Amino acid sequence: MNHAAIETVTTDSLRIRRQLETAFSGPSWHGPALMENLNGVSAEVAVAKPLQSAHSIWEIVNHLLAWLNEVGAGLDGKKYVTLQGDADWPPVADRSAAAWDATVKELTASHALLCKKIDALSDVQLRAKVEGKDWDLRTVLRGIASHSLYHAGQIGLLKRAAQ
């Protein structure tokens, strides 16, 4: 296989999409991806606070979902903002198993929608500066992948602590 030929057709959007997919569902060389860590987590475990000073798994998932949606809205033209308060860490309102399942499904759907939006971006669009910021769109999108991995690690630790 000629790797040089493959690299010449690989766009930034494809590289970022691969990074997001690996962080979200794996496989990753470093350990479990986000959804791998969420596999088998019940609503009871998701809402538990085995470490009182830490967020619960469910709170982290709500936080990840908020940021996936915010970045997706930014790709639709919404001005970039740094989420704060309940917008950044949405509280868990309904602690039922059905609500947990719906939250995980919404996380998966938001991730898929963001990936679809990324597929439509050109390298020129990805290199454009975010309005009012010192970074480009690639930085934001790579950041959302890193954000998922960071919290995947927290979820893995909380999952172990809760069991």
Image (spheres, rainbow, N blue to C red):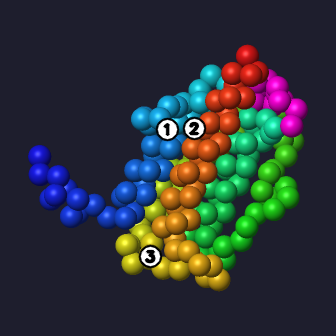
Between 121 and 3, the one nearer to me in the picture: 3
Q: Nearer the viewer, mark 1 or mark 3?
A: 3
Measured as percent of width and height from the top left, residue 55 is found at: 80, 39
User: From this viewpoint, is residue 96 visible?
Assistant: no
Q: Amino acid at mark 1?
A: Ser
Instruction: Tell me, yes or no, whether the two marked residues, 2 and 1, touch with CB atoms within 8 Å.
Output: yes
Q: Is residue 110 above or below residue 101?
A: below
State the image quarter where residue 159 is shown: top right
Residue 127's disc number: 3
Q: Residues within 10 Å of mark 3 (few under 14, many from 20)?
A: some
Q: Is residue 105 above or below residue 18?
A: above
Secondary structure, mark 3, is helix
Q: Amino acid at mark 3?
A: Arg
- Residue at label 2? 34
User: From this viewpoint, is residue 127 visible?
Assistant: yes
- Using residue 110 as the reference point, say whether residue 128 is left or right of it: left
Instruction: Tell me, yes or no, whether the two marked residues, 3 and 2, touch with CB atoms within 8 Å.
Output: no
- Using residue 65 as the reference point, say whether residue 5 is left or right of it: left
Q: Residues within 10 Å of mark 1 (few under 14, many from 20)?
A: some
Secondary structure, mark 2, is helix
